[in-house]
Amino acid sequence: MKSALGIFVLTKREQRVVIAIVLALLVGTIAKYEWTAHSRPLPLNPTDAAATPPAAAGRDESESADETQ
């Protein structure tokens, strides 16, 4: 059984290489997640988005009819 576990015995230099590889993979994964999670596509026509106020976009017709009466 000791011969099978012998593959896990690493020198200090090999341990540093393994740690560097694992950290590089971890940083790459986090960077990719942050990039995809926080990137927002640009609007196709930015003037249309500015013309419609956000409060009016969520209103129903029945709500606006109640306010006029």
Image (cartoon, rainbow, N blue to C red):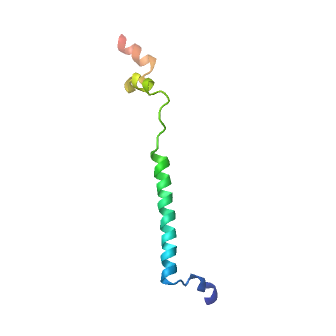
Q: Position of residue 54 (x, y in %)?
A: 39, 27
Q: From this viewpoint, which residue is outermost toward the bottom?
A: 2
Q: Residue at x 49, y 63 (%)?
A: 26
Looking at the image, is 42 positioned above or below residue 60? Answer: below
Residue ID at (48%, 71%): 20
Image point (38%, 24%), residue name? 53
Residue 51 coordinates in the image, percent (x, y) = 40, 22
- Residue 47's place in the image compared with 67, above or below, is below
Quarter of the image with the N terminus is: bottom right
At a point 42% along the width and 22% down the height, the residue shown is 59
Which percent across, then down, holds residue 32?
A: 50, 53
Note whether 17 is above or below 57 in the view shown: below
Please say if 68 is above or below 42: above
- Residue 58 can be seen, yes or no: no
Number of numbered callouts drawn: 0
State whether residue 39 appears in this view. yes
Quadrant of the snapshot with the C terminus: top left
52 left or right of 6? left
Place of residue 64 in the rendered image (x, y in percent of width and height, measured from the top left): 40, 16
